[in-house]
Amino acid sequence: MPDPAVTVVVPTRDRPARLTRLLAGLRAQTVGVDAFEVVVCDDASTDPAVAEILQAAAGEHDRGGLRLRASRNDRARGPAVARNAAWRNARAPLVAFIDDDCVPTPRWLEALLDAWGAVGRTDAALLQGPVDPDPGEFPQAQTPFSTTLWVHDAGPRFETANIAYPRALLERLDGFDESLVIAGEDTDLGWRAIEAGADVVWAGDALVHHGVIAQTPWARLAKGWRWRFVPAVYARHPGLRDELVVGVFWTVWHWWLFRAALALALRPRAPGPGRPTAGLRGPRRGIGWSFLRWLLAFPYVRRLTHYRTGPLLAPYRLACDLVEVAAIGVGAVRHRVPMI
């Protein structure tokens, strides 16, 4: 049996249907199933169907199927731990990461290997490919509470939905930081690779489709709190801070929300006894003040009123954004990095 050219690493937890689709996508790879292996780490799934799927797939290589090995964590420890456990069992010189809510297009691995070959199969490179929502699910399965993913340029977050590292580089970096339990571990690894001298190679033909993931309204709201881990990554990697909007804000939505809050603070008021009649502390009346407030607030108001189903869900969208801003703020204070 030839040695694999690439190892595909998959962390999974309680997504049997999506895991089945991912494995089907891997079986359809144009490089052929003998050219790669699949290493899956089950992060303590509670659904027994996950174990059944993996057990069935692990025995199919003798029948011309995938070369798959699986391990299982005894308790849920997060994707960083699962990915580390999997890639450390890799046999190939290149390790390709994909998530269990994704499906690779047939040329995914071929395009990654071609891109790596074009740079001389160097250990000082990481390879990133594009991610689009699954065309079988988007936009028809999109709801106000669902999530998906677009990646059309290299970096700066280096999402593990579609990225590959030479195994030697992973060993040198010691893999993912497991203290970043549920967010930021992929970004941190990518920036540590860059700081260690690695180049980022864009593999534009290595397309992966990301599922449209349904969530309850509460789960969608609570998801924002996970981003409290993100400021730790920005504190570690000064170069990443250049990606902040206006040097401070994590996303453009946060910048727009700040502007809307400022517009609210500049609301008109009449001069009361003892108040000045001009300046920022003055009456704030007239067309000039109105135009300034409109200019500040318009981008965020438009976001709220045009979000998927229109203004009906504006209060909910505002609540989600406030949770996200609070999470970033908490992390920023903890790690002493100026961002929000």
Image: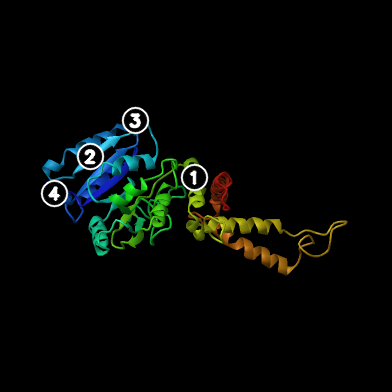
Mark 4 touches mark 1? (CB < 8 Å) = no
Q: Quadrant of residue 91?
A: top left
Q: Earlier in the sequence, mark 1 or mark 2?
A: 2
What's the amino acid at mark 2? Arg
The structure residue drawn at horizontal position 43% and vertical position 58%, both measured from the top left corner, is 156
Disc on res. 229? 1
Residue type marked 3: Asp
Which of 327/51 is in front? 327
Residue most extreme to the top: 74
Q: Badge 2 is on which residue?
A: 69
Residue 120: x and y in percent read 25, 62
Q: Nearer the viewer, mark 3 or mark 4?
A: 4
Q: Earlier in the sequence, mark 4 or mark 2?
A: 4
Residue 200 versus residue 96: which sits nearer the camera? 200
Q: Between disc 3 and disc 4, whose residue precedes?
A: 4
Q: Is residue 220 above or below residue 139?
A: above
Which mark is in front, 4 or 2?
4
- The reply to whether the C-beta atoms of the residues labelled 3 and 4 are less than 8 Å apart is no
Which of the numbered marks, if any, corresponds to residue 2?
4
Query: What whole-number distance in Å separates the C-alpha atoms at marks 4 and 2?
Result: 16 Å
